[in-house]
Amino acid sequence: MADAGAKRAADGVETELSQKGKRAKADNDHDQGEERKDSESENILCGFKTSNVLSDSAREKIIFIHGKLADQEAVVILEKTPIREDTLTELFSGSRLKLEMKNDIYSTYRLQAPPHLNEIKTTVVCPATEKHVKRHQRQESFLVEETEGDYRSITLPYIQEQSFSVQWVYNILEKKAEADRIVYEDPDPEVGFVLLPDLKWDQKQVDDLYLIAITHQRDIRSLRDLTSGHLPLLQNILQKGEEAILQRYKLPASKLRVYLHYQPSYFHLHVHFTKLGYEAPGCGVERAHLLADVIQNLQSDPQYYKTRTLYFPLRADDGLLSKFKEAGRL
Ligand code: M7G
């Protein structure tokens, strides 16, 4: 999980950041109106029954809860949103302040902000599978070494049976969901993709910018399927994705971390675009592969990702980890 302190750390370009902050806010004003309408019309969480807390972090101000929503298994994620520079004037003038203690030059207060400046980003997964529940449980991880043979004999059969549904991805590609959130689309069936905000990003500030590019091609599961034949697709995503982000959020390529996960959670090729300096979950070296490196590796060896041994972490309760153990590979 990301370190919230680092995640919100300023990267030192004051004016640039505040401009972007304003831009992100402006982009979001329209959405906010819609969100408010939605939440006012129906609070589906009023009947949520908590079973247990899967994990939480006081530092990151996030909690993952397992429970039931209308008799269906559900996971609810609550995360306090960052404080935005462009709301400070209103925050200082429009809040109530309660003194907790005062000692010499030091004092602490409880600041009660107006409700719209004190929101909690809420993600609901319902109905949630056992896999969704396990995914958010605090767990030990183990690094797995996957050879070309391991991929064919252990991983591939497992993911063909067990991976998460990618229906949400097809809904995006077919404009059945999130169509109004699309930032850029290249509709070409071979090299095209849809770029849109990731579920994890509330779009209120560019400090934690997070978008994903989802390919129109549906038969590329992951990094492992890529060959030099996919170079036009990968180069297109990198170039047009960066251009679209520069245009919309005024962030140049030099401020972006563009990468693929191996292993991903969802086996339909997609690329993560996050702001450099934001420690997005899963951006560590054991899981993230820079798209620029992937392109170069395929240029020097067309079969690079088919043949290389790849390393990735698996959680203690992951069924794939058991398969590696059974095969004597761990
Ligand atoms: P991943 O590398 O397959 O797995 O990335 P990860 O979730 O372990 O990182 C999938 C990415 O898609 C993640 O960054 C998710 O937050 C994001 N994502 C997942 N879902 C279900 C949705 C969704 O419904 N909409 C959007 N916009 N993003 C999603």
Image (cartoon, rainbow, N blue to C red):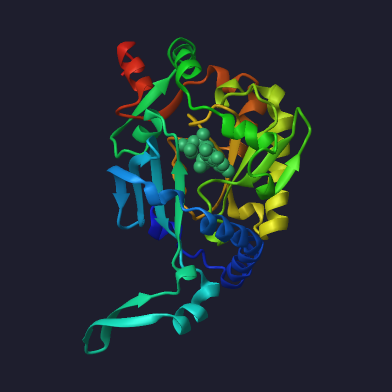
4 left or right of 295 in image: left
Location of residue 92 by image quarter:
bottom left
221 left or right of 6 in image: right
Percent from the top left, x then y, of residue 257? Answer: 56, 47
239 above or below 99?
Answer: above
203 above or below 102?
Answer: above
Which residue is depicted at the point 35% across and 26% down?
Answer: 318
Percent from the top left, x then y, of residue 128? Answer: 42, 34
Location of residue 225 by image quarter:
top right
In this view, the residue in front, 46 or 267, is: 46
Q: Can see residue 219?
A: yes
192 above or below 163?
Answer: below
Percent from the top left, x then y, of residue 227? Answer: 65, 22
Which residue is depicted at the point 76% across and 39% down?
Answer: 186
239 left or right of 147 in image: right
Which residue is depicted at the point 64% across and 46% down?
Answer: 196
Q: In which quadrant of the rendered image does the C terminus lie?
A: top left
The count of marks equals 0
6 left or right of 168 in image: left
Q: Can see residue 208?
A: no
Location of residue 27 by image quarter:
bottom right
Q: Residue furthest right?
A: 188
Q: Residue furthest bottom?
A: 104
Percent from the top left, x then y, of residue 268? Answer: 59, 28
162 above or below 241?
Answer: above
In this view, the residue in front, 203 or 152, is: 203
In this view, the residue in front, 290 or 25, is: 25
